[in-house]
Amino acid sequence: MITINLLPPEERKKKRELNLPELSTVYMVGAVVLFLGVFLTIGFIQHHRVADLENKIEEARKESRKLAPQLTRIKKISREREEVDRRLHLITSLDKYRYYRVRLLNDIGMNMPGNCWLTGLVEQSQNSFVIDGVAFSNYKVADIITNLEKSSIFTEVGLKIAEKGTIREREVMKFTLNTKAMPQ
């Protein structure tokens, strides 16, 4: 059906006109809404992740508190084990060189020529020794040096001091040797 409005235009009901904004304004508003939507979504996701991580941290702390006595015990056992290993190493090294000094003194005694006596032996370090002695002549001092150099234990033999002295009105040579010895 067709309706015709015969009223003059001034009295007619005015139709509402829909004024559309410009297209660029629509795009701008849409972009702002989209940005706010993305921003809120990312914020929500990050908040959710932070909450998950905080829960995991709290669970790890609970487990850490639960395992703390065992960890303390493990550390104590590790320290005790290190101490036992250190002692075993010390015992092994002592056992390894147990006869070293006995062989050293035996070798010195075997290489001592006649009319030559040992008056002192000082260990300066594990491989370095000072030998003091008395002999009737320079030749005996030279003999002991030569004999010790031929020995398999002594690596370096050097004369430090050789001086005349007297024992009970008898002229003697007092000597001091520096030696290096290798444990075998």
Image (spheres, rainbow, N blue to C red):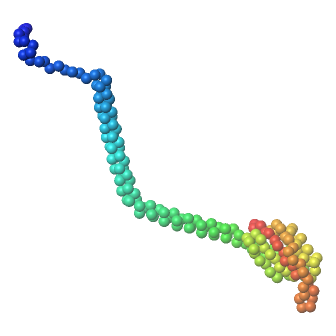
- Residue 134, quarter of picture: bottom right
Query: Residue 53: where, in percent of width, then height?
Result: 36, 47
Query: Residue 59: where, in percent of width, then height?
Result: 35, 53
Quadrant that contains the N terminus: top left
* Residue pictured at 29% horizontal, 25% vertical: 25
Query: In the figure, 163 relative to 51: above or below?
Result: below
* Residue pictured at 83% horizontal, 68% vertical: 156
* Residue pictured at 29% horizontal, 31% vertical: 33
Query: Residue 159: where, in percent of width, then height?
Result: 87, 73
Residue 130 visible in rendering: yes
Query: Residue 157: where, in percent of width, then height?
Result: 84, 70
* Residue pictured at 67% horizontal, 68% vertical: 93
In front: 41, or 31?
31
Q: Residue furthest bottom?
A: 168
Residue 110 visible in rendering: no
Query: In the figure, 145 relative to 67: above or below?
Result: below
Q: Residue furthest front?
A: 10
| Count of picture labels | 0
- Residue 132, quarter of picture: bottom right
Q: On the picture, is 105 further left or further right than 114?
A: left
- Residue 158, quarter of picture: bottom right
In front: 78, or 40?
40
Quadrant that contains the C terminus: bottom right
